[in-house]
C-alpha cells in the first residue's frame, strides 16, 4: 500500500513535469530504474532514477614492504536520465559518493535534430577504450585493466557529434573536442606568507581550466547480431541472443600544450552462448615536434563463461610496454569469479591478480585480492 501511494505521488509529479493540470498521459513505476513519464500533446517528459553501490575489500601483498588491506565503498552512485520537451532532447546526470568523497561524473545534454545525428555537450567518458567506456556495473573482473590508466582514458568536458554509439548500432561513430584536463577537480588558492610560514586565505575547487587544452577524440565501430546496448557490457548474460560481436577503433590527438601526445587503439568484444571475450591493442606517442616519439604499447585480453546464468569464471592478461628502457613495463595476470544472484542487480565479484613491474632488468611482483559486493537498481 505504501509503495502504491509513492507511485501515485510520482504520477502527480509527472503531471507537474508536463506543465498541465490534466495531462494526456502520466505514469510512474519501475522498469530498469524508477521512472516518471508525462505527455501533454506534442510535449513529452521523462525521468529515470538509478543507483549503483559497490563495497570492496582489497588485500595487497607487495614483494617488499608491508601488506595493506581495507574495506572501501568504491562506488555509491545516483543517476538521473530522461528527456524534456521531446524524446529528441535527452539528459544524463551521474554523481558518485564513493571513497568518502563527492564527485560529478556525468552531466550532459544530447539533442538529435535527425535520427542519425546527435549533438552532445557536457561531461562524460571520452569515447576511447571499450573496457572503460562500458559500465562499471557490467565487468567480468572487479575493475578495469591497468591499460586504461596507461593510455589516457577518463571523463572530460566537451562537445561531440555522434549517432548513439553507446547503444551499439550496426555502425557507430563519434567525434568530440574536449578540454583535455579530465574530470577530476583541483584546488587553487592564495597564500599569505609570513616569515617561513604561510596561511591559506582563499581556496576553490574546480575542474574547469582557465584555458582549454584541445583534445580531439574520434571512434568508429561495427556491431553484428543483436548487440543493441551490449557492445559495452562485458559478460554474456543473454545466451539466447546467439552470436554477437563488435569491433572498433579509436584515436586521441592532443592539439595543445608543450608535451602533446597522441594515442590510438583497436578493440573488440565477442559473445556467444554465455561465453564472452574482449580485448584491445593500444599505442601512445609524443606528437611534440621537438621531442622523441618514445611510443608506449599495450594489450588487454580477457574472457569469461557464464554457467547456468549464475557463475562466471574469468581471466585477464594485460601488459603495458614502453619503448623507453627507463620506464617500467607493467603486467597484470588475473583470475576472477562472479556470482550472479540476480544478474548485475545483485552480484559478488572476486579476483586474484599478479601485478608485475620490470625496469632495467629488475622485476617485482605484487599480489592483489579483491572481493566486491554490487547492488544496482
Image (cartoon, rainbow, N blue to C red):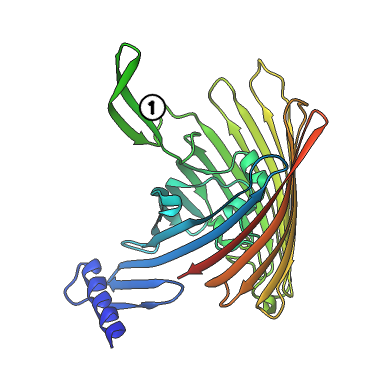
- Report the quarter where the C terminus lies: bottom left
Residue at the spot 74% in from the left edge and 25% down from the top edge: 326
Determine whether 315 is above or below 1 in the image.
Answer: above
Foreground pick, 216 / 322: 322
Q: Secondary structure at mark 1?
A: loop
Determine whether 201 is above or below 48 in the image.
Answer: above
Residue at the spot 36% in from the left edge and 72% down from the top edge: 35
Q: Is residue 282 left or right of residue 184?
A: right
Determine whether 209 is above or below 300 in the image.
Answer: above
- Res 276 seen here: no
Tell which residue pokes out farthest to the top in this image.
Answer: 195
Residue 155 horizontal/vertical position (percent): 50, 44
Foreground pick, 49 / 316: 316
> Alpha-carbon neighbours of circle 1 within 10 Å: few (<14), some, or many (≥20)?
few
Determine whether 8 is above or below 90 in the image.
Answer: below
- Report the quarter where the N terminus lies: bottom left
Residue 78 horizontal/vertical position (percent): 40, 60
- Res 181 seen here: yes
Q: Is residue 207 left or right of residue 350?
A: left
Tell which residue pokes out farthest to the right in this image.
Answer: 361
Number of numbered markers: 1
Residue 89 horizontal/vertical position (percent): 38, 58
Tell which residue pokes out farthest to the bottom in this image.
Answer: 1
Q: Is residue 361 left or right of residue 137?
A: right
- Classify residue 275 by image quadrant: bottom right
Foreground pick, 198 / 172: 198
The residue that mark 1 highlights is: 210
Residue at the spot 73% in from the left edge and 26% down from the top edge: 294
Foreground pick, 2 / 113: 2
Residue 199 horizontal/vertical position (percent): 29, 22
Amino acid at each position: 500500500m505504501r509503495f502504491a501511494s509513492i507511485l501515485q505521488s510520482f504520477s502527480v509529479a509527472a503531471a507537474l513535469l508536463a506543465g498541465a493540470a490534466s495531462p494526456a498521459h502520466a505514469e510512474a513505476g519501475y522498469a530498469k530504474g524508477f521512472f516518471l513519464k508525462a505527455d501533454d500533446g506534442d510535449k513529452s517528459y521523462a525521468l529515470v532514477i538509478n543507483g549503483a553501490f559497490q563495497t570492496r575489500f582489497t588485500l595487497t601483498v607487495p614483494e617488499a614492504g608491508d601488506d595493506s588491506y581495507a574495506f572501501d565503498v568504491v562506488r555509491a552512485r545516483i543517476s538521473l536520465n530522461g528527456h524534456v520537451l521531446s524524446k529528441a532532447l535527452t539528459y544524463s546526470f551521474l554523481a558518485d559518493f564513493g571513497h568518502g568523497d563527492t564527485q560529478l561524473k556525468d552531466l550532459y545534454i544530447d539533442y538529435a535534430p535527425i535520427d542519425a545525428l546527435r549533438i552532445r555537450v557536457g561531461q562524460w567518458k571520452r569515447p576511447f577504450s571499450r573496457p572503460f567506456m562500458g559500465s562499471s556495473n557490467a565487468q567480468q573482473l572487479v575493475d578495469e585493466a591497468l591499460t586504461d590508466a596507461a593510455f589516457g582514458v577518463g571523463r572530460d568536458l566537451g562537445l561531440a557529434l555522434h549517432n548513439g554509439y553507446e547503444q551499439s548500432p550496426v555502425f557507430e561513430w563519434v567525434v568530440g573536442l574536449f578540454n583535455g584536463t579530465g574530470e577530476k577537480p583541483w584546488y587553487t588558492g592564495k597564500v599569505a606568507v609570513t616569515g617561513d610560514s604561510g596561511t591559506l586565505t582563499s581556496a576553490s575547487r574546480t575542474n574547469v581550466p582557465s584555458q582549454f587544452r584541445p583534445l580531439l577524440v574520434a571512434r568508429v565501430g561495427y556491431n553484428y547480431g543483436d548487440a543493441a546496448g551490449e557492445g559495452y557490457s562485458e559478460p554474456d548474460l543473454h545466451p539466447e541472443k546467439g552470436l554477437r560481436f563488435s569491433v572498433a577503433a579509436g584515436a586521441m590527438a592532443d592539439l595543445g600544450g608543450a608535451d602533446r601526445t597522441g594515442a590510438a587503439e583497436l578493440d573488440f568484444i565477442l559473445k556467444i552462448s554465455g561465453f564472452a571475450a574482449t580485448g584491445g591493442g593500444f599505442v601512445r606517442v609524443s606528437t611534440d615536434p621537438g621531442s622523441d616519439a618514445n611510443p608506449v604499447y599495450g594489450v588487454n585480453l580477457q574472457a569469461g563463461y557464464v554457467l547456468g546464468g549464475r557463475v562466471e569464471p574469468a581471466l585477464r592478461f594485460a601488459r603495458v610496454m614502453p619503448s623507453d628502457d627507463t620506464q617500467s613495463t607493467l603486467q597484470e595476470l588475473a583470475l576472477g569469479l562472479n556470482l550472479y544472484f540476480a544478474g548485475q542487480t545483485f552480484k559478488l565479484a572476486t579476483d586474484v591478480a599478479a601485478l608485475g613491474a620490470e625496469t632495467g632488468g629488475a622485476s617485482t611482483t605484487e599480489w592483489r585480492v579483491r572481493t566486491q559486493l554490487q547492488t544496482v537498481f
